[in-house]
Amino acid sequence: MLMPLLAQMAVGRGAKSCGVLSPAYSEHARTARMAGLSVTEVSDIETLAAFDYAVIINPNNPDGRVWERSEVLALANTMHQKSGLLVVDEAFIETGYAESVADAATSDGLVVLRSFGKFYGMAGIRLGFAIACPDIAESLESRLGPWAVSGPALHIASEALVDQVWRDEMRLRLKEDSQRLNGLLEKVSLTIAGATSLFTLVRDARVQDLSIHLMRNGILTRTFDERQDDMRFGLPGVEAEWVRLEGALVEFHSATGTSRHPGLDPRN
């Protein structure tokens, strides 16, 4: 709900163009277009300074790229000076792969978004929040109305945010699970093109066939219409899911052989 409201707010402030650092979660570009903005997807952070409304996902989804805090803050300052708006989506920030800029969201040039559906694994409560200067926060609150979030969701979120022990334990568990997932993927010659501890992106010419094979085994992954060789894997849950995934990958690899592409360092 916050993404379309922010795009609409930017239009109300006079924005006409939107730059999204891509490849990226497609909802940012979609909601910007719905608000009437001309959207361009770009590959480097410096290019975003040319737009009225800019979006960065840090760490990025789906390739895990990260941007230095100094780079993000420099862009936020540029946007503030030109009365533009930078939105930094930190939905995966709790994984520890990138440095947050939430503490710097004190001017009208920067808004930071957070979510409970990723690291906290609570997508079902449909809850996220924006960190912004008072003027933007009040504007968003007035647009959302008084009943945007349920009482139980607020209680759950409040408890989660202060539980540092759980966060530390979860980061360790996710790191171990991520290493296990990456080991399975490399075992069957799938090239890792990017990652955080919550997901891994692979790049392979066999991705479309692999997607069908995995679905037949009850395993869903994320493929991309615009990048036919890319596939994003999430982490399995219980041990039986790990076993099923490994069996399906080994079966596919045995039947098709290898077709590797150069990998990318997710921290670049």
Image (spheres, rainbow, N blue to C red):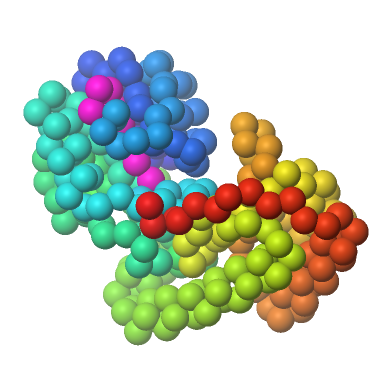
Query: Which of the 4 quarters of the picture holds residue 201?
Result: bottom right
Q: Is residue 60 left or right of residue 76?
A: right
- The x, y position of residue 233, in whole percent, is 63, 58
Instruction: Examine the rendered structure and indicate whether residue 148 appears above or below residue 240.
Output: above
Q: Position of residue 125 (x, y in %)?
A: 50, 58
Observer-nearest of 167 and 206: 206
Residue 222 seen from this side: no
Residue occupying the point 38% across, 77% down? 167
The segment highlighted magenta reads 49-57
Q: Residue at x 49, y 67 (%)?
A: 197
Provide residue 161's location: percent of width, then percent of height: 32, 70
Vertical position of residue 152 compared to residue 183: above or below: above
Look at 29% across and 28% down and name the residue there. 47
Question: In this orientation, does residue 99 appear?
Answer: yes
Residue 82 point in image, percent of width and height? 13, 24
Residue displayed at 55% across by 53% down: 263
Question: Is-magenta flag for residue 190?
Answer: no
Q: Is residue 198 left or right of residue 1?
A: right
Q: Is residue 55 magenta?
A: yes
Question: Which residue, as the protein is rendered here, is positioned at the far right?
Answer: 255
- The quadrant of the picture occupied by the N terminus is top left
Q: Toward which corner of the image does residue 159 lie, by quadrant?
A: bottom left
Give whichever of 89, 189 is nearer the camera: 189
Residue 187 to residue 38: above or below: below
Q: How many marks?
A: 0
